[in-house]
Image (cartoon, grey):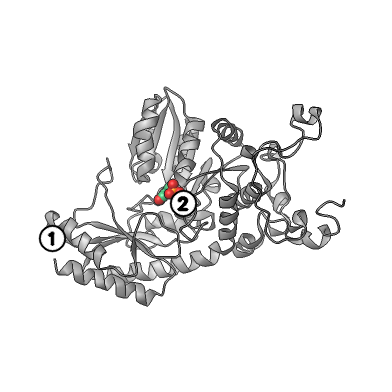
Amino acid sequence: MPGPASGLTDGFARFKSCRLHPSAKGISNMKDREGPLHNAGINTRLSHLGNDPAEFHGFVNPPVVHASTVLFPNARAMETRGQKYTYATRGTPTTDALCEAIDALEGSAGTILVPSGLAAVTVPFLAFLSAGDHALIVDSVYGPTRHFCDTMLKRLGVEVDYYDPLVGAAIEALIKPNTKLVHTEAPGSNTFEMQDIPAIAAIAHKHGAVVTMDNTWATPVYFKPLDFGADISIHAATKYPSGHSDILMGTVSANAKHWPQLQEANITLGICGAPDDAYQILRGLRTMGVRLERHYESALTIAKWLEDREEVATVLHPALPSFPSHELWKRDFKGASGIFSFVLAVDAPEKFKAKAHAFLDALQIFGLGWSWGGFESLAVHVNLNDRRICKAPAEGPVIRLQIGLEDVVDIKADIERGFAAANAV
Ligand SMILES: Cc1ncc(COP(=O)(O)O)c(C=O)c1O
């Protein structure tokens, strides 16, 4: 029987991103792996990366391979694991297609898939930290990451300190002889402080620490952490890559130096992404660029509009020139996604909660829900009580908005409904 690629290879080779055995990752040249897509525009890349119709009878999308066992042709092949796929925790054609697309976008040597964005943070922490080590974590970190550090990491004997997101090269004063990991997230969760990633990475590397970055906000479309000195790029693919509020998945991508240890931890822990979810994330990538353009434009339009509203004390959006760390965003990022916060102007702290709740309860288009990156607008009254350094603003409650794909005029009308209700309290 002819192989699946028989007779199709030439015609479909145009957008072929050559598939590699995982062991080859890290030694291959990214340009060769991507072929003609290397210099293509981002939407062309997002449309074709990780996709090789020639391998699947010409079908545009990869098959969803449901698997645990993979059979070997003989005992020798089984003993030496001498074939591309050996067991489904170590990859399938579906998960490989997504990993290859992410590697191409991140410029990474290898990517692992995990079942959630939170696992995309905890797995590399477990990969690179041991009892007796010290980790530096940005204070504007995603809340559940802090919870993991303060509970499980602590229990495993890892010491954690939180640092100011605006610390830059002054992070050197916080480095200890046992500092093994510096975790960054830019912009920060809920308050959106930017970070000087190259400056922090240079100091961390000088002292032998690995640099991880939660890059969920920007996606690799707007920021590529490995190009700016990070060793590990972390994504809640749950957000923009999924885009439809129906999938949980995380991706962790490493540079060549750190890929073997990350892959080893992934195999050791047995925490792997499911094929249906990988398929849906790959599907989401195809439209992520155009969705992001819309999120970027709508969110910035609304952020600027909010700046002029008397109900608003401050708008926390890195792409606004008024934002304190805007220059870092301008220097390093290619764009902004659709989530930011604003501080509702409230004269007395005892009214913060009532006004915030009145605002949220009056919204009809915005949903009240966690997460972001989907097609629909969402609003949250942010709780910053766990912060050690970046304390909550004194001017009023912080409201986080995820601006969806709806029409801006309708989103503004909804926010106005919220303001009217808050004013009435
Ligand atoms: C910055 C950031 N990282 C990671 C996560 C975790 O993603 P997940 O919800 O898939 O666990 C989130 C979720 O809101 C997030 O905002």
Say whether residue 422 is left or right of residue 35: left
Between 55 and 68, the one nearer to me in the picture? 68
The answer to the question of whether label 1 and label 2 lie on touching residues, with beta carbons closer than 8 A, is: no
Say whether residue 365 is left or right of residue 218: left
| The furthest residue to the top | 132
Kindly identify the amino acid type of the residue bearing the numbered disc 1.
Answer: Asp
N-terminal-most mark, 1 or 2:
2
Note whether 130 is above or below 425 in the view shown: above
Q: Position of residue 283 (x, y in %)?
A: 59, 59
Between 284 and 336, the one nearer to me in the picture? 284
Q: Is residue 70 visible?
A: yes
Pointer 2: residues within 10 angstroms few (<14), some, or many (20+)? Answer: many
- The residue identified by callout 2 is 216
Pointer 1: residues within 10 angstroms few (<14), some, or many (20+)? Answer: few
Confirm if mark 2 falls within 8 A of ligand 1. yes
Kindly identify the amino acid type of the residue bearing the numbered disc 2.
Answer: Thr
Residue at 53% from the left image edge and 54% from the top image edge = 220
| The furthest residue to the bottom | 409
Between 59 and 226, the one nearer to me in the picture? 59
For label 1, the SS is loop
For label 2, the SS is loop
Q: Is residue 170 visible?
A: no
- The residue identified by callout 1 is 347
Q: Position of residue 267 (x, y in %)?
A: 59, 33
Q: Quarter of the image containing the C terminus? A: bottom left
Dividing the picture into quarters, in which one does residue 262 lie?
top right
Between 102 and 203, the one nearer to me in the picture? 102
